[in-house]
Image: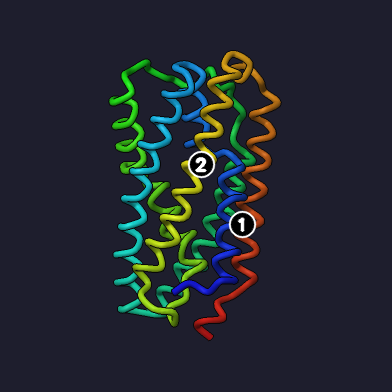
Amino acid sequence: MIDSGSLVVFVLASLALLLAPGPAVLYVVARSVDQGRMAGIVSVLGISLGGWVHVVAAAIGLSALLVSSALAFTVVKYLGAAYLIYLGITTLLAPTKPVGDTEIVKMSHAKIFRQGMIVNILNPKTALFFFTFIPQFVDPSRGSIALQIVFLGSIFLIMAVITDSVYALVAGTLGEWLKTNQQFLKIQKYLSGTIYILLGVTTALSGNSSES
């Protein structure tokens, strides 16, 4: 299935991305600040379930792409590297806004779960992320592409639940301090942007040994 070396690199790359909070984490933080730790954790679970839908979609789509053209699959992998660099640049250039500026409507836990799931399912950026990030670690010579993508995607989402839940617990505890702390948001922005760019550059330079 997945080469052990590639799996280790994937886990480390995923951990780097997850520890540098992106838009989903900022939403979880805002929800936790306004409605408490449990609301934040519920939103994490909804977002993760929505993400799994994108993983399955990526598995189906990328498998079909490989069958039709190995060259097209390679192009997607390089586009993925370019997309990661693009994410990094746009993150660095984006204005920093306090968590308190995020519009959060108070609702029940059931509605919070559904909202997190639906918002993530309908988010084209999430679909594009899974379609471009996971293929960097897929080896067509090691069996089913679809199973590899589902396997890697599931690992990523399990890690996301753990790291995002930590953010929810911390945000729910610190509450008011995070609403207006610009330093936290500046660190988040520069850390996230730098990690995206580094991963994109590393991917672009590493090539595709399995396809050469």
What's the CA distance linking mark 1 and mark 2?
15 Å
Q: Amino acid at mark 2?
A: Ile
**Depicted 142 relative to depicted 135: above or below:** below
Residue at the disc numbered 2? 162
**What residue appears at the point 56 percent right and 71 percent down from the top-left corner?**
4
Residue at x 55%, y 77% (from the top left corner): 208
User: Image quarter for residue 18?
Assistant: top right
Where is residue 143? Give x, y as percent.
39, 78
Asked if 212 appears above or below 100 in the picture, the reply is: below
Give 146 or 36, whichever is nearer the viewer. Answer: 36
Q: Secondary structure at mark 2?
A: helix
**Crowding near pointer 2: few (<14 within 10 Å), some, many (20+)?**
some
Residue 40 picture location, percent across and down = 45, 27
Q: Judge whether 32 appears above or below 78 on screen.
A: above
Residue 155: x, y in percent? Answer: 46, 55
The residue identified by callout 1 is 12
Classify mark 1: helix, strand or loop. helix
Residue visible at 32% across and 57% down in the picture: 56
Left or right for 122, reference 5: left
The three-letter code of the residue at mark 1 reads Leu
Query: Is the residue 91 above or below the residue 56 in the image?
Result: above
Quarter holding residue 39? top left
- Front label number (1 vs 2): 2
Quadrant holding the N terminus: bottom left
Other-residue count near label 1 (Cα within 10 Å), few / some / many at <14 / 14–19 / ≥20: few
Question: What residue is shown at x 63% (from left), y 72% (from top)?
Answer: 206
- Where residue 160 sits: x, y (%)? 49, 45
